[in-house]
């Protein structure tokens, strides 16, 4: 059996979460008209980790520029190492990869490359995560991290017409003190941030560990979101805490909520939006006898679903169009449901109401003429 078939087989059984594909090509779609509709649609994205957009080619370029050696012969060998079977094994690869990010220019180049790809796919607005604790640990200054990304955001808006904002993620499996130090280091740049989030390995690191951080972020005018990755231990308890105790503004992933009608009702009543990433976590497996399709189940439960690419560089280089096309196929999404997902996105933007309305109007104009 060839290695690719072997990896595909693991993916099919749920043994691994994502498969590196040839240059990011998605399997031919059975409905090319729907694919064309998706590609042309004005879109937004709310769950993309900038460090997760660090493509192997750029890693080599940055390593060369920063005088670092990488333990891979070439891009193909590096990409072949992107094999993981759960959240911790994914995170190990992801954190190792970001070590090449050293200078302000590196963060600029990373963010600009993502924004250029997104703009080319008709993303007109994105809210992007970054993990500053990992960079501070390596001695990079917060000013360089936020400064480089912000410079890229401004250039991309001017040159490519894509608007974006930045969400600082606390790396939940590092200490609470390190997260607070990162927040304090970031607050002088709070005008360049729109919110804080919570990512990394959830096991043993529930959302309440960050109660004070969230309160301080809110007191400084920032919004709050939290990852509740699928099929994690205590996931329903953590979703409940995030929703009802910490009163987060949004939930990232959160697919297990469909297992609790009570939590679904709370999320619906609060109008909470979920940033679902089906490439990484499109199926509930560990907690279900029969696998449950996350996007389909959440849509059917009447939740506000948006779809995002999460860490595309590590997930077959599939950016938003490919993610949506694949989601349409696997979750049998109709054109009307895809429009609902796009509307949910603009409605969830952390932007003034008038700006959201203008973006929604662009979507409606597209839908009318498509
Ligand atoms: N860091 C990057 N991607 C992540 C994900 N999907 N879940 C948790 N932490 C992450
Ligand atoms: Zn994520």
Image: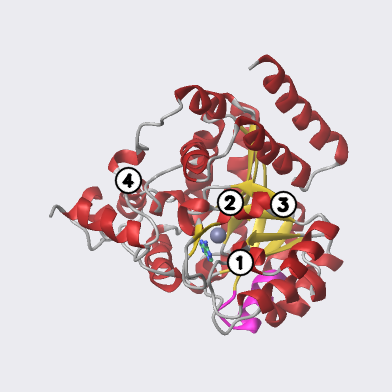
**Residue at mark 1:** 256
**Label at residue 192:** 3
**Residue at mark 4:** 57
Find residue 87 and report its horizontal and vertical position in percent.
45, 69
How far apart are the two marked residues, 4 and 3, measured between alpha carbons? 28 Å
- Segment colored magenta: 172-184
Quadrant in the picture for residue 80: bottom left
**Label at residue 68:** none
> What residue lies at 68% left-to-right and 22% top-to-bottom?
367
> What element does badge 1 sit on?
helix
Marks 4 and 3 in Cβ contact (< 8 Å) = no
Nearer to us in this view, 260 or 155:
260
Q: Is residue 41 above or below residue 196?
A: above
Q: Residues within 10 Å of mark 3 (few under 14, many from 20)?
A: some
Q: Sequence-wise, which precedes: disc 1 or disc 2?
A: 1
**Residue at mark 2:** 295
Marks 4 and 2 in Cβ contact (< 8 Å) = no
Find residue 200 and report its horizontal and vertical position in percent.
53, 70
Q: Sequence-wise, which precedes: disc 4 or disc 2?
A: 4
């Amino acid at each position: 059996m060839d290695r690719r078939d072997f990896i595909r087989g693991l993916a099919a059984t749920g043994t691994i979460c994502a498969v590196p594909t040839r240059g990011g090509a998605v399997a031919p779609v059975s409905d090319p008209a729907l694919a064309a509709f998706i590609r042309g649609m004005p879109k937004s994205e709310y769950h993309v980790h900038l460090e997760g957009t660090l493509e192997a080619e750029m890693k080599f370029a940055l390593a060369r520029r920063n005088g670092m050696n990488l333990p891979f012969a070439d891009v193909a060998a590096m990409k072949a190492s992107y094999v993981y079977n759960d959240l911790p094994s994914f995170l190990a690869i992801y954190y190792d990869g970001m070590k090449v990010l050293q200078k302000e220019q590196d963060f600029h180049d990373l963010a600009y490359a993502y924004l250029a790809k997104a703009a080319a796919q008709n993303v007109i607005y994105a809210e992007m995560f970054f993990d500053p604790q990992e960079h501070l640990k390596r001695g990079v200054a917060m000013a360089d991290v936020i400064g480089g990304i912000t410079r890229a955001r401004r250039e991309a808006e001017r040159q490519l017409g894509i608007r974006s904002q930045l969400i600082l993620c606390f790396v939940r499996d590092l200490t609470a003190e390190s997260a607070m130090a990162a927040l304090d280091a970031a607050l002088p740049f709070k005008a360049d941030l729109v919110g804080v989030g919570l990512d990394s390995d959830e096991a043993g690191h529930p959302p309440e560990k960050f109660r004070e951080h969230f309160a301080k972020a809110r007191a400084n005018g920032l919004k709050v979101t939290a990852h509740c990755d699928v099929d994690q231990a205590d996931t329903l308890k953590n979703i409940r805490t995030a929703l009802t105790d910490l009163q987060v503004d949004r939930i990232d992933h959160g697919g297990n909520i469909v297992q609790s009608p009570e939590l679904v009702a709370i999320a619906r009543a609060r109008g909470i939006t979920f940033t679902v990433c089906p490439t990484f976590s499109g199926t509930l497996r560990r907690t279900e006898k029969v696998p449950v399709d996350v996007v389909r189940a959440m849509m059917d439960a009447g939740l506000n679903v948006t779809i995002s690419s999460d860490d595309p560089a590590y997930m077959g280089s599939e950016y938003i169009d490919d993610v949506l096309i694949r989601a349409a196929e696997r979750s049998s999404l109709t054109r009307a449901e895809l429009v609902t997902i796009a509307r949910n996105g603009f409605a969830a933007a952390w932007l003034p109401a008038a700006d959201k309305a203008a973006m929604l109007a662009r979507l409606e104009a597209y839908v009318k003429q498509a």
